[in-house]
Amino acid sequence: MNNAIDEFSELYAQAASYQSKWPIGESSIAYFTRAIGDDAAVYTDAEVARAAGYDVMIAPPTFVCETVQYSDREPDENGYIGHAWHLEAKGWRRIRGGNAYRFHQPVVPTDIVRVDWKVASVRETKDSHGDPMVLVVSEAVYRNQHGALLAENSETIIYRRAG
């Protein structure tokens, strides 16, 4: 039998880039703050943001990583328009393993976001029962229209045998 990792070989060296057509906009930031229940005024009031040392209102840190403001793709079969590797892993169950974020500067309403994704690693390990698991780590780098680094996101997806 092949190593479990052999089934994931198509992921090696994959990369993808997306460029938004439009600025983030104040309303997108305001709707996101409502959705996450964060009522900090620096996210919705330019005067408060200026008093806090910002030039304009800013987005909450995870906004750029957890929304798909960069995407202009058609929805997939599940209605998702964000990035996905679309791996056909028959017999495997996909589990979101978590994210590690690094934020470099606030996202502002005038930002036009570009994101570059790449597969950083694919490795096989075992679960507590000794069954194979494959860990796929993707890295996304978010920049604005000026090339300024906004954030980095390292995302882990775990694949376990189904059944």
Image: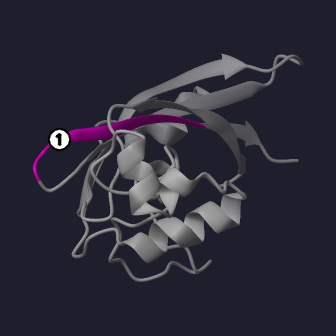
Picture residue at 72% right of the left edge, 26% below the top: 132
Tell me how the rendering is colored: one colour
Is residue 87 at least partly visible in the picture?
A: no
Expressed as whole percent of the image width and height from the top left, the position of residue 97 reads: 67, 35
Left or right: 135, with 116 as reference point: right
State the residue in front, 91 or 59. Answer: 59
Expressed as whole percent of the image width and height from the top left, the position of residue 76 reads: 51, 78
Rendered position, 3 above or below 68: above
Picture residue at 26% right of the left edge, 58% below the top: 113
For the N terminus, the quadrant is: top right
State the residue in front, 86 or 27. Answer: 27
Task: Read off the residue under disc 1.
Answer: 148
Rendered position, 163 above or below 114: above
Queried whether the magenta region covers residue 56, the answer comes back as no
Expressed as whole percent of the image width and height from the top left, the position of residue 140 reads: 36, 41
Left or right: 126, with 49 as reference point: right
Picture residue at 53% right of the left edge, 69% below the top: 30
State the residue in front, 70 or 47. Answer: 47
Q: Quadrant of residue 118?
A: top left
Queried whether the magenta region covers residue 148, the answer comes back as yes
Picture residue at 21% right of the left edge, 75% below the top: 21
Q: Residues within 10 Å of mark 1 (few under 14, many from 20)?
A: few
Q: Quadrant of residue 127?
A: top right
Is residue 148 at least partly visible in the picture?
A: yes
Left or right: 136, with 127 as reference point: left
Q: Main secondary structure of the magenta part?
A: strand
Say which amino acid is labelled 1.
Answer: Ala
Rendered position, 25 above or below 42: below
The span picked out in magenta is 146-156
Mark 1 lies on a secondary structure that is loop
Expressed as whole percent of the image width and height from the top left, the position of residue 64 reads: 43, 53
State the residue in front, 115 or 127. Answer: 115
